[in-house]
Image (cartoon, grey):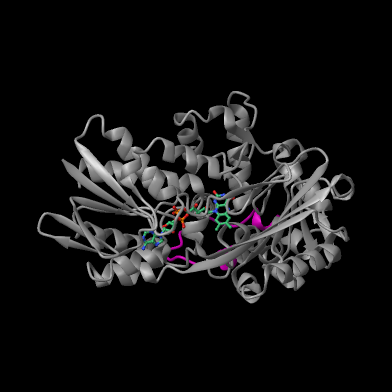
């Protein structure tokens, strides 16, 4: 019988375990999952407070990437899937202390509708002129990676980096556009530049192609689960073999041996034919330090950023006075600590009763680090102070919760894809080793699900 160890019980490790559980019917195998903490699910964590579904970690996933929703359906959670309320989708950007709505037709930062962008106070005339000039950008075969900030600046200028690219990406990666790799983070845009030159023209061509095809109702941008993201992790666990799941079991090291791998956790060591390491890169680097110092060094070089989410519940009165829409983003240049706030009751109405307003506020990167050591009360105080400055909200919340996530969001720095090639070469020198998680090809939940399941399949087929 083939024995496989999975290290890490976040959504990546659980997805790998679920895949192995499916494959068990055809292959003679067993698995053991090691999780350092007492609970499974990693950053997927939900609290139910006063009728509200409060997400401590991820609140949803993008619908365009199918792997998380597919897994939900396979788990029988199809009825639990909910879409974001896109009829009310409106996102504001803080510009010189005032909220300005993002104009209609912006695809990330690429304008596809002239009138709303031309009339929007979000951009200066200088940036609007750059947008027109961008349409004449010639195709360009770039032979090296560059930062998202450099890429966007070349196309639209620095105001676009500050007001849109940086806050939008910080919301996903917790990092800065000046450090993130355009090839890893915005591969579609890098490809558009290569083929069309102008991102605006490429986007318009894609739209024309789509409208020539059969008319389809656009799916909601984001998908989630009615009762919260933790429910996904909990449901996977119900489908796994209970005796295969070890919690409170931090792995110190894994090492290759003659016919497989030894996994050392606490005072115990166990022998396996193969191992799937489903950990954040720094933890993966640590457990692999003796097996391959080179691989460990490459993994350790993938940076992570910390983040803090703050859930605030309010009464009906606040719900009535808050602006419509999904929430707002705060560019770095505004000098605030908050990066974003989501009006959850608008984005996912199922998550708050009609007489409640639910806000999810977000600190990331350096701003999260700067408030890290403060008490929850002090952090809530900072959030309330900034909410008052930004949206004039003075009301006392009915409840508040602070969730801190240390080094949980991978930063795909410039050169990330080249690093992944080196990692893959080094991994192949260690037969029976699989890698999964948010360090590699996608930080979101769908990509983590895909990476876990693919690693499991590959280990069974080849490992
Ligand atoms: C605040 C926040 C908001 C986010 N929002 C979204 C969102 O809205 N949509 C979206 O798609 N994505 C979002 N993400 C990203 C996404 O949630 C994560 O990238 C993904 O869940 C990571 O899953 P994972 O299993 O790879 O890692 P983790 O969830 O970090 O799990 C790794 C597990 O490994 C365990 N571990 C660590 N070391 C060891 C060891 N030595 N031995 C055994 N176990 C160990 C840890 O305890 C942990 O449980 C968000 C992330 C954060 C932090």
Q: Position of residue 33 (x, y in %)?
A: 33, 50
Q: Position of residue 262 (x, y in %)?
A: 20, 59
Q: Is residue 129 magenta?
A: no
Nearer to me, 313 or 441: 313
Q: Position of residue 55 (x, y in %)?
A: 63, 50
The residue stretch that appears in magenta: 132-151
Q: Hey, which residue is sitting farthest left in the picture?
A: 258
The residue sitting at 42% across, 61% down in the picture is: 280
Nearer to me, 123 or 205: 123
The residue sitting at 44% across, 30% down in the picture is: 74
Q: Is residue 24 left or right of residue 189?
A: left
Picture quadrant of residue 419: bottom left
Q: Is residue 373 left or right of residue 446?
A: right
Q: Is residue 272 left or right of residue 67?
A: left
In this view, 209 is above or below 33: above
Q: Hey, which residue is sitting farthest top in the picture?
A: 214
Q: Is residue 146 magenta?
A: yes
Q: Main secondary structure of the magenta part?
A: loop
Please state, as top left, top right, bottom left or bottom right, where the N terminus lies in the image. top left
């Amino acid at each position: 019988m083939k024995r496989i160890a999975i290290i890490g019980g976040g959504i990546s490790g659980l997805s790998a375990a679920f895949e192995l559980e499916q494959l068990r019917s055809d292959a003679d195998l067993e698995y053991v999952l090691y999780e350092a903490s007492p609970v499974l699910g990693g950053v997927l964590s939900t609290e139910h407070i006063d009728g509200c579904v409060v997400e401590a970690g991820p609140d949803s996933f993008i619908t365009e990437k199918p792997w998380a929703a597919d897994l939900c359906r396979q788990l029988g959670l199809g009825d639990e899937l909910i879409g974001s309320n896109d009829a009310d989708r409106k996102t504001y950007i803080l510009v010189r202390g005032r909220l300005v709505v993002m104009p209609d037709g912006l695809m990330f930062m690429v304008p596809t509708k002239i009138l709303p962008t031309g009339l929007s106070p979000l951009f200066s005339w200088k940036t609007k002129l750059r947008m027109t000039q961008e349409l004449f950008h010639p195709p360009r075969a770039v032979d090296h990676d560059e930062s998202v900030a450099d890429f966007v600046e070349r196309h639209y200028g620095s105001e676009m980096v500050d007001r849109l690219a940086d806050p939008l990406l910080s919301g996903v990666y917790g990092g800065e556009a000046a450090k993130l790799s355009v090839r890893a983070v915005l591969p579609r845009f890098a490809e558009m530049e290569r083929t069309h030159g102008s991102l605006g023209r490429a986007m318009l061509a894609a739209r024309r192609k789509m409208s020539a095809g059969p008319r389809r109702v656009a799916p909601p941008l984001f998908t989630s689960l009615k009762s919260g993201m933790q429910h996904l992790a909990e449901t996977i666990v119900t489908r796994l073999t209970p005796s295969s799941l070890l919690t409170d079991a931090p792995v110190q090291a894994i090492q290759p041996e003659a016919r497989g791998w030894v996994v050392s956790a606490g005072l115990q060591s166990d022998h396996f034919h193969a191992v799937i390491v489903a950990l954040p890169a720094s933890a993966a680097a640590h457990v692999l330090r003796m097996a391959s110092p080179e691989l460990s060094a490459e993994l350790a070089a993938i940076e992570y950023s910390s983040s803090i989410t703050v859930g605030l519940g309010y009464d009906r009165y606040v719900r009535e006075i808050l602006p419509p829409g999904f929430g707002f983003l705060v560019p770095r240049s505004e000098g605030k600590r908050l990066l974003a706030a989501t009006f959850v009751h608008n984005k996912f109405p199922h998550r708050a009763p009609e007489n409640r307003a639910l806000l999810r506020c977000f600190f990331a990167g350096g701003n999260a680090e700067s408030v890290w050591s403060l008490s929850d009360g002090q952090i809530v105080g900072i959030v309330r102070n900034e909410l008052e400055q930004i949206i004039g909200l003075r009301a006392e919340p009915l409840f508040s919760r602070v969730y801190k996530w240390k080094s949980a969001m991978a930063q795909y720095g410039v050169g990330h894809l080249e690093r992944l090639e080196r990692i893959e070469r080094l991994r192949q020198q260690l037969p029976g080793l699989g890698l999964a998680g948010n360090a590699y090809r996608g930080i979101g939940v769908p990509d983590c699900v895909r990476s876990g399941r693919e690693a499991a399949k590959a280990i069974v087929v080849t490992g």
